Structure formats: structure tokens, C-alpha cells
Image (cartoon, rainbow, N blue to C red):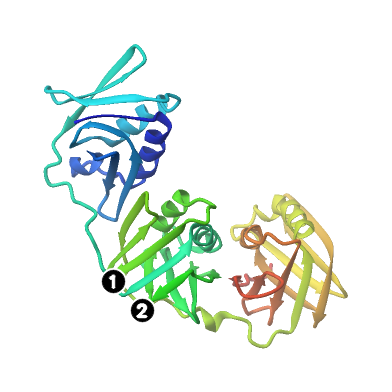
Amino acid sequence: MKFSCNGTDLANATNIVSKALAANKNIPILEGIRMDAHGDQLTLSAYNQEMYIQKTIKADVFAEGNLIVNGRMLNDYANKISFLDKIEIEKQLNNKLLFSFNKSSSEINFYDIQSFPSLGEYDSEDVVTIKESSLKELFECTIFCAAVNDSRAILKSCKLEIVDDVLEAVCLDGYRVGIARKKPDSFTGKFKAIILGKIIGDINKILTDSNDIVTIKKSGSTVIFDMGHTKIRTTTVEGEFYKYESSLPKNIRTEIVVNKDELEQCLNRAGIISREHFYNNIILTVDNNVLNIFSESEKGKVNENVDCKSVGDTVKIGLNNKFIQEALVRIKEDYVKIQIESATRPILVSRMEGDEYRCIILPVRMV
């Protein structure tokens, strides 16, 4: 095997596939990155039993072949030489992979591909195509609501489903629910998949803000995200996802419209005190077009007021400050809408119009 490629392209590729390197050392082959040089392309692959990532870049291939190198070492080294326009890489007879550039060279041990799995081919009637930027926004607006350490896999997952001809993503952790919806370019079948949140988080780091099309295929318990140059395979989580609809406010007593930046500034200042509480408690009071934010601890007290437009009853409710802040960050508009049913029911944070993004937040006990 012998080829040459661009240093930046190689580093970008190793950065992407290294997200699927195995963390434990029980299966050494899964600590490696597979390299396949064929035609005019170099394909890198990694697999950790939860996710398979394959990335293809352009290369001048002089001799075709494949092998496996230690993934961490290859990724670290590729990033050190990412500034180079051209790197020559050649398989040596002594199980060494030779990297040559300018007047320098280095060697990394390699081993045969043995039983390293392939991505495989999957045909499916359940297919969704969507712009890469839209899929990225779907994930960014929901993944923060997935649990991290909960023993229940469903609470650590993200549900992707075609609902009313739109692609809906939902994550929840038992205290809040993130819901985002985007119109796909096309879909066939009844697409529905539940995928671990940490995998969705890794996929989101790979996605860009481009309008290139991502094809998502579901075949049995396998889901493929195909971006053309990058393909990601993962498996679904078994079980029934929780019905978030019952948490939506039904009999709204109070609706608030408030400037997002002004509210965020107040919450940031209130956070200096509220973070002293285990649940980051604040108390929101809405009365006569003023939203009051109050928090008190042994170390201090904060009392913030921001003008708003309120319709309905005066209301007082305890909330987790961090949860409100994280919901607001996902809204890119000047104003945000907050709907409240009662002090003991979840509130709804959303954009001014439509249902492309909504966040349900459970109240906390007022102290």
C-alpha cells in the first residue's frame, strides 16, 4: 500500500473516526483505525461496538491495500502534520507504516485487518433525507435534555421519528424535555428510531452547517447516517419512548413574552446565588408585566426584575435556573415565549411562532 494525501484532510478524517475508537483495551483490534487505499480514495474506519464511523478523503494511490494502525497514535500524529500540503504514506515489509514529508519521516506499527468489521450495505424502506444544517439544529435543540448517568437507557437516548410529515427529535431526562421539528427533504416508510444520546452527541460534532443532504436509513435495529464522504452506523435502543405530550401545558393560565437577552442576563446574575442550591433553585413571579427572579442562600440574595408582556393570572413558580438558561440558548430570536399552567405543572419555553423548538421544564419546590 502506498499513497499520498493532504495533511489537513488526513487530520480531519482521523479526528472524525476516532470518535468511534474503543475506550477499553479488552479488544485491541477495536483500538485501531482501519486504512483502505483504493482507486483515488483513502477510507478510514473505526468501530467501538456501539458506533461505526467511515470517512473517505481524496488520495493519490500508487499501490492499493489495507491495514490497521493504533487509532490514538495515528490521530495524534496526523494532527501534528496537518499543516502539510502533501504526505506520502507507504507500507513497509517490517510491519511499519512509513510517513514521509519534506526531508522528514516517521514510522508507526501496523497490523493486518484480521476480523475488523466492515460498514456493510443496508437497504431499507424507512429512509429520511434532510439538510445537514437542519439535522444539526435538531440535535443541538434536544441533546442537552438527555440524561447522562441514569441507569435507564431511554432517558439517555434521543427519539427520531417522522410525525405529521416532519422529522421530530425528542430527548428527556425526567426533569425536562427537549422537542425539535424540521421538515425533511423527503422520507419513505414510517421512520422511527431511538438512539443513545452520547452517540447523537458525537454525530452532532461531525455535522456542519452546510445544506448538503444527509440520508438516514433504518434497517431492523441498525441506523445509518450517510453524508456521502462520511458514514456512521449505530444500533437502536430497545423499548418504548416516554409520551411527552402529557407534560405539555393544557390549561394555560399565564403566558409571558420577554426579551431573550435581558432575561438571560438576569438569570446569569441570579445564578451566582442559585448555584449554591442543590437544584439551582430560583423563584419566578409574574405580575403586571414584570417578571421577577428571586434566589436566596446563606451566602446572599438576588432580586432581578425584567419587563415582559404577560397575559393571564399572576403566578409564582420554582424552577431550576440552569434548565431555563440551557433552553434559552437554543432560541436564536430576540423574544421568547413562556407558558405556565400552574406552580405545580411543567412550563413550556418556545419560540414566538411555530413548534420547531419547545422545551418542557418541571417545577421545583419553592424554599
Q: Which mark is residue 10?
A: none
Q: Which mark is residue 124?
A: 1
Specify whether residue 289 is in view. Answer: yes
Circle 2 SS class: loop
Q: Nearer the viewer, residue 244 or 41?
A: 41
Residue 310 in which image quadrant: bottom right
- Tell me the quarter of the image containing the C terminus: bottom right
Q: Amino acid at mark 2?
A: Gly
Q: Amino acid at mark 1?
A: Ser
Query: Farthest top residue?
Result: 103
> What residue did someone put label 2 on?
189
Specify whether residue 298 is in view. Answer: no
> Is residue 22 toward the left or the right of residue 190 in the image?
left
Q: Nearer the viewer, residue 79 or 42?
A: 42
Residue 137 in which image quadrant: bottom right
- Tell me the quarter of the image containing the N terminus: top left
Q: Would you call the spot at circle 2 few (<14 residues within 10 Å), some (14-19), or many (20 or more)?
A: few
The answer to whether residue 88 is above or below residue 335 is above
Residue at left offset 30%, top offset 30%: 73
